[in-house]
Image (spheres, helix red, strand yellow):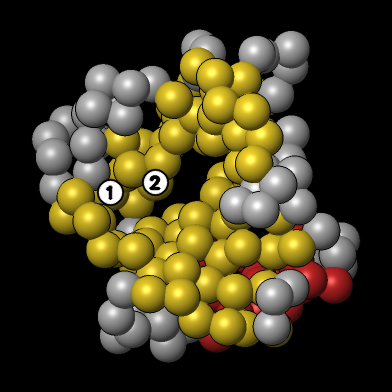
Amino acid sequence: MILDKIENISLYQGTHKNLDIALKYLKKGGYSGLKAGKYNIQGDEVYAIIKVCKTKTAIQHKNVLEAHKKFIDIHYVIEGTEQIGFATLNKQIPIKAYNLEDDYALYKSSYNVLTMEKGMFAIFFPDDTHLPEIEFNKISDLKKVIVKVKI
């Protein structure tokens, strides 16, 4: 898992061709005016999901974390603040087995929390479980882009 601000995004380039495409997309900007929905960047290999929502309490999320096997997730906050729960995948037993078609499994486990504000991003690799969109002090509006990067 990587947490940083957009100004430092170039530090993470050069590790994977699809990750480089995603990082260049985020660095370029221009997505803040986009409406909620899915946007192709590089076919099925790299795409963005613009999400507009309200944050929730961890209890509303039922403390359930997700993990992926085929994609890296990059979460970038366009507007608002959120907390994201995260834990390294390590012998947790899934409460929902891996779904190959939708590329996710769900886990209930203890986790740490990071706070993301406007202009910050987090990269979650297949070994990272994560629970996004947790409220920070109060329920609030959130606009973010999630870039899905095929491994």
Kind of residue at disc 2? Met
Residue 71 located left or right of residue 25: right
Sequence-wise, the earlier of marks 1 and 2 is: 1
Q: Residues within 10 Å of mark 1 (few under 14, many from 20)?
A: many
Q: Which residue is mark 2?
A: 116
Q: Position of residue 110 (x, y in %)?
A: 50, 12
| Figure check: 41 above or below 37 | below
**Which residue sits at x=65%, y=13%?**
93
**Which residue sits at x=69%, y=64%?**
149
Q: Does residue 126 appear in the picture of this structure?
A: yes
Q: Residues within 10 Å of mark 2 (few under 14, many from 20)?
A: many
Q: CA distance from mark 1 to mark 2?
A: 6 Å
Q: Which residue is mark 1?
A: 81
| Figure check: 5 above or below 25 | above
Q: Position of residue 138 (x, y in %)?
A: 12, 35
Number of callouts: 2
Marks 1,2: beta carbons within 8 A = yes
Dot 2: element: strand
Dot 1: element: strand
